Amino acid sequence: METGQKVRAIFLGTALLCLLLLLTACLGGGGGGGGNIEREYSVSGTVIDSDNKTLAGVLVRSDGNHRSYTTGEDGIWQLKELTGKQTITASREGWAFRPATYDVDGERLGLEFTGSKLQYSLVIRTTGQGTVTQEVLNTAQDTHEHGTKIRLTAYPDFDWTFSHWTGDVTGTMNPVELIMDRELEVTAVFGQASTVNGTISVRHQFPTSILEGQGRLSAPLSASETYESLGAELDELSIMFDGSLTEKEEREQLDSAGFTILDHIAILHAYLVKPPASDPGFLGALGLPGAFYIGPNQRVYASGLRIPNDPDYSRQWHYNQIRLPQAWNVTTGEVSIRIAIIDSGIDPNHPDLRNNLDLDNAYNFVDNNTNVQDGDGHGTHVAGTVGAVTNNSRGVAGVLWNVELLPLKVLGDGGSGSTWDSAKAILYAAGLSPVGIVPGQHNLPANPKPVDVINLSLGGDYDGVQHEAIKKAVAEGVLVVAAAGNDHRGLLYPAAHPEVIAVGAVDYGTGGVPRRAWYSNFGPELDLVAPGGDELGAIYSTLPNSSYDYMAGTSMAAPHVAGVIGLMLAAGVPKAEVRDVLTKTAMEIGGEGFSPKYGYGLVNAYWAVQAVSEMRVIVGERMGNKVIATGETAILPKGGPYSLTLPQGGKHRLIAWIDVNRNDLVDAGDYYLETEPFDFESGQTYTDWDGIALELGLDQ
């Protein structure tokens, strides 16, 4: 072989050897089988806090092999099946750990992480004049660790008012609570308050309420809006434009505000729209250029009145006078309500009474027997007003449609009786034993079904026995109503007793505001007045022998109040609150406040069954039948002086609102009035809105 050939052979052999060696290295070479496999190992340790206590809930993990372990109460952790170099970390929300990491490349024992809670700063600023306090709610420490709950309370300086929060906390809630989960900055904004002062009075419509005459709110609503059309859910909105825009521009405005057009009345520039889900209060409609009317698409209901079908109801003008048709729309009574008619008896066979009478427990205290036949007619007339069978297409209506009347006869056929017998009847009605053992005389047991209300359309001079009987009945929870008397002088007894609800009479009113009936007694003991009638219009009710006729007097006024009390009890007004509710809701006549002629006013059945307690005086806006308040106070429902603070300036209306059914919606039967918008400046005092009269007529 030549030299050149030898060299090439050596080179090829060497290259082949190198290639074999390289393959051996790459395959892990060596004899027998397989190569070197990378070794697995484990690491373990504990997690503690800065007080050397073990820490649970810590996630320990490796970055390379993605192994992890969450510590339990013992704080121990272990990561298995690790290979190669790994970085071990510990984490838990709101905590920091040291060391931050461990770098491992083989088995390690006893690795320890020490955790400490993260600390955050809370920066509090103020705009305007006021201070902010902070109270740590769930830890005694001064530092704000992760998860610390803090309550911030803003206190405005004198003549300033808290407006709202900005920064990491927003809104008007004060105080406000927050959770420290990061660095926070909060600003309390204070503004110079405006004060609004004035007086509001209520004017009632007579002889019937304006609700019965297709009346409308004394507010800038469209001409077709009435009380009856204000009970809808706010799911669709009606918007009218003023005609300054083209139809295309109107539609573009609605589209840009997110409204979906459902219908269109071109001649009115009116659109029926559905608001976006993000704007349930329709606030997006307020700023639409050219829009002059915004209101909900209302459902229309029948009038908020309930009229019985009794053919002679049209003669009972006195029920409209005290707002019974509205009250009947709330309740017509309950058969569980029991009212004692302590009088001249009741005709037990009258077809318009007998189904509402408890004859099993009725009693005649004049003759000491169970015959309560009325030979005078007075008691039957009173009973018909309290609870004639109503809506039965017969005769008259009673104040209570559903009730149980207990006839107790204490007046003879001539219309007179004794205070002794009336005292026994009062005790019996209350479920108390009226007599002791009298030889040779029928001894009446206690009434097994005590009454809720006693009506006493009778009177005379003071009698101690009668007074004690009344006090015992009242102590048993019985409400006692009595007529003031018909002598044009001071009140008779029992009406004059402080435990008794004393009722005077008003006249027909000749189509206008009713006045004290010429005969009605008066004085400081008088609580209320009710229809008693006069020569121009008396009270129509039941009489013996299945008949009906007119009678007048405070005896006719008292059963109106007794019946209204029954309605109140059926509506859930507690007995202990009845007297207070009656006086607070009565319609004032001839002046403000209490007067000896009218007491606290004419009984208002509708307000009484709803237990109306306040008139809301609001600075803000109305959107459909919702009111959005910027500032608010409350006064008595009869009106009077008010003063409220307006947190910030701007254009607002003054709204006077008696929300009778307390549903936070302006609807049928409410008393409501709003002024035109007025531009308030911060820090000013406005009396009667700077000259705008607030003697509002709130008609119903």
Image: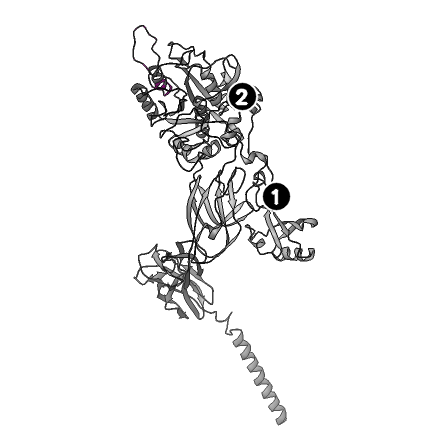
What residue is pinned by disc 2?
396
Work out whether 11 lies above or below 616. below
Residue 470: quadrant of the picture:
top left
Is 430 one of the magenta-colored residues?
A: yes
What residue is pinned by disc 1?
223
Count the marks.
Answer: 2
Q: CA distance from mark 1 to mark 2?
A: 37 Å
Name the outermost residue toward the top: 440
Is 103 one of the magenta-colored residues?
A: no
Look at the image and tell me in which quarter the N terminus lies: bottom right
Residue 51: quadrant of the picture:
bottom left
Any part of residue 168 in sight? no
Q: Is residue 597 shown left or right of residue 546?
A: left
- Residue 635 in the image, given as x and y percentages of width and height: 42, 43
Work out whether 610 lies above or below 628. above
> Which mark sits nearer the N-terminus, 1 or 2?
1
Give the main secondary structure, helix, strand or loop, of the magenta stretch: loop
Q: Count residues near mark 1 (Cα–Cα under 10 Å), then give few for <14, some for 14-19, many for 20+.
A: few
Q: Which residues are magenta?
A: 426-442
